[in-house]
Each structure stands twice: as C-alpha cells, then as structure tokens.
Image (cartoon, grey):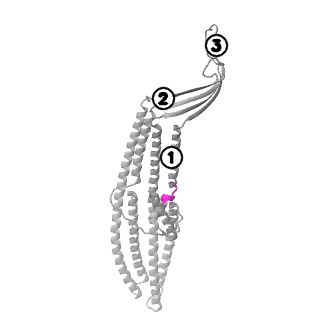
Amino acid sequence: MKQISVFILILFALNSFAQENLSLEQCYALVEKNYPLAKQNDLLLKQNALDLEIIKIEKLPKLDFLAQASYQSDVTSLPISIPGTTVEPPNKDQYKATVSVNQLIYDGGFINAAMAEKSASLKTQQKQVEVNLNQLKEKVNQFYFSILLLQEKSALLVAKKTELETTLKEVKAGIKYGVLLPNSDSVLEAELLKIDQQLVEVDLNKISLMKTLSLLIGIPVSSNITLENPEINTQLNNEIERPELELFQLQKEKIETSEQLINKKNSPKLSGFATGGYGNPGLNMLDNSFQTYYIAGIKLNWNVFDWNSTKKQRESLQVNKEIIDSEQEVFELNTTMELTQQQSEINKISTFIQSDEEIIALRKKILETSASQLKNGVITASAYITELTNLFEAENNLSTHHIQLQFAKANYNTTKGF
C-alpha cells in the first residue's frame, strides 16, 4: 500500500512539474524513490534470495569423486607360513577411484534456523534503509523552506517595486506641474534600481538551492517552478513514531533468531552415505586385482560437549540485546528533548506572527500618511522610501515567520515520525 501511495505521489509530482508547481509531500516521495540509497532494497532482496538458496543446498545430496594412485614402502603380511596355503601380500602400488553420496536425513532444525536468521537479517537491513531515507526529510525541509523564503521575498520585492513605480509616476507629474521639487524622482528611481539588484540576488540564490534540491530528489527542477506554501498540521505531544523504534525491535528479534541458530548448531545430525569404487586392491586386501566395491550406511554426528562455547555465545547475544535496549533509551530521550525544544520554537514563532500583524497594520497607516505628504510636498522622497521600506520589512518579517512556523512544524513532524 505504501509503495502504491508513493507511486501515485510521484505521478502527481511529474504532472505538477509540467504546471510549474511542486509541493513538500512530492519532494518527500521523490527522495524516497530516487535517492541512490533506495536501490539497496532491491539489492538486499536479491542477496537474501541467494543466501537462502545456498542454505537450502545443504538439504540436497552431496556427490564426491576421488581418484588416487599411491606407492607405499611396506604392506601388511603374515609373520608365519601356513602349510598348503599361499597368501600373497598386497601390492605396494595401489589404485582406487570412488564416487560417494551423502544425504542429510535429520539436522535438528539447524537449516530452518539458519533461514530464519537470514530472513530476520533482511528485515533489519531493510528497516535500516528506511531509517536512513527518513532522515533525508530533514534535508528536504531545509532546502524546500529556504527556497520558499526566497520565493516570498521575491514576491514582496515585486510588490514594493510596483508601489514605487506607481508613486514615481505621481511624483513626476507633481514635478511637471511644479508641485514638487525637481530631482524628487531621482531618489525613487535609485530605490527601484536597488530593488532590481535585490531581485537578481534572490533569483541567483534560488537557482543554486533549486539545483541542490534537484540532486536530492533525483528529478530535474526548473528554477521557474513555484513551491507550494504548505499548511502543516501538528499534534504537539511527545509520542514518537519513528522507524528507528521498529529497527531496535527488529535488531532484538534478529538476536533471538541467532540464539535459536546457536542452540541448533550442536543438535544431533543424522545422514546416510553410499560409496562405490573400483581399485586394486578392493575391500579384500588379500586379492591383488582390480575390483568393484561399495559401502553404504548411516551415521550420527552429535557434539555432546563444546566447553561451554554455546553458553558463552548466548551470553554475548544477551549483552548485545541489552546494548540495543540502552541505545533505544538514549534515542527516545534525545528525541523527546528535541521535540520539546521544537514545541517551544513553534510557540515562539506563533507569538511573533501576532505582533507582526499589528506592526503591519500600523505601518500601513503611516505609509498612507507619508504618501499623501509626499504628493503635497510636505516630506521628501527619501522620507517616503524610509516608511515604505519599514512596511516592506514588517511584511517580510511576517512572511518569514509564517514560513519559519511551517518549517518548524515540518521538522517537528519529521522528528516525531509523523
């Protein structure tokens, strides 16, 4: 289901690119799909399939071929002679060729335990990949909201420029009819040039960040694309839903499968065998001729005492499990502390936004008065620009705080695992 959702988001993202639009959720989906680390999931599945096939081979018959020619310095002979009987000693040069088949009959569950251990290892590795990909959301947040800040600043600069151009026309009309002093328009024209410089700087910075974001999400992103300003919802509590918690659990489950594998290692193993051969001598050492022969049977192998090696390995795994519990405790503590700090940041920025709105309302009234005074020649163009800049800075602060609030909420959700 999750893969289907990601696929739908990517299709939607590609459609949005054609519309020159990109959202934060689309960036999340793209980085999860296209970042090089995501390829490891397929590789891990392929590796696990090979490992399981290797383990399953242990259930198949083992076939061995042996060919040997030898010469020995002495052979077995009778120390006495028996009247009427001639016993020839074996030849010192001997030859044999054999084919042996060994079939495992019972392994005490060792093979099944080994396969279970490999499957647990695969789940742990896949979850580690998910954890690493999830951590990339912090980078996505950083670049996305940095671009969004530049985007909003550019919009405010354009609005300021439009306001100045309108005022410039009125000032030039006032100069023409002698209401305003000559060169009053020069101050406004200089300010317009300054705004053009700021717009160029903002565009260049945006292009640079867009290129970095493009590399991160694995899709070419045009600098003309507009990023959507998200409205992020958060639940301000310390409940953690990070994939790291699942990873800790899977690591402990893998240790449990390793314990089962160790327990099965010393289980009795029963196998059948058969050997067919041709050699000189054969099984009858007193017959100096080439013969065919065979041996068949079953054998039991049981390591009854291993000098407490199994016990010590289990103790080592138990210590490892305690280490994982400690790491989980540290992770939960650090994450809770980080969430607490981010909650404070969210509350602080929310307070700033309220005061920003009050400041803007006052600055607009002041600017209206200044515009009227400029038209009537009461104040200079420089004084008007000062008030216009003050309003622009207040609006920029509000816009910045709005984006910072969404940025803080996005980081909060990322830290929480939402």
**Crowding near pointer 1: few (<14 within 10 Å), some, many (20+)?**
some
Hey, which quadrant is residue 174 in on the image?
A: bottom left
| Residue receiving disc 3 | 87
Mark 3 and mark 2 in contact (Cβ < 8 Å)? no
Report the span colored magenta.
Answer: 31-37
Q: In the rendered structure, does residue 57 fall within the stretch colored magenta?
A: no
Q: Is mark 2 on a helix, strand or loop?
A: strand
Residue at the bottom extreme of this rendering: 177
Where is residue 401 shown, x and y percent of the image? 38, 68
**Residue type marked 3:** Val
Q: Which amino acid does label 1 sit on?
A: Asn
Q: Residue 78 carries which label?
A: none
Q: What element carries label 1?
A: helix
Tag 2 and tag 1, C-beta contact below 8 Å: no
Q: Distance between the residues labelled 2 and 1?
A: 31 Å
In which quadrant is the N terminus drawn? bottom left
Q: Earlier in the sequence, mark 1 or mark 3?
A: 1
* Residue at mark 2: 300
Tell me if mark 3 has few (under 14), some (14-19) or many (20+) residues whose alpha carbon lies within 10 angstroms of its own: few
Instruction: Name the residue at 40% across, 84% down.
Output: 371
Residue 57, image x and y in percent?
A: 53, 39
Q: Compared to 102, does 386 lie above or below? A: below
Q: Answer with the quarter of the image where residue 322 lies.
A: top left
Residue at image coords 44%, 36%: 264
Q: Is the magenta stretch mostly helix, strand or loop?
A: helix
Work out whether residue 145 or residue 364 is closer to the camera in this orientation and state it. Answer: 145
Rounded to the nearest angstrom, the CA distance separating label 1 from label 3 is: 61 Å
Residue indicated by mark 1: 48
Question: Which residue appears at 44% of the width and 78% of the height?
Answer: 160
Closer to the eye: label 1 or 3? 3
Q: Where is residue 285 in the image (x, y as percent from the top left)?
A: 61, 19
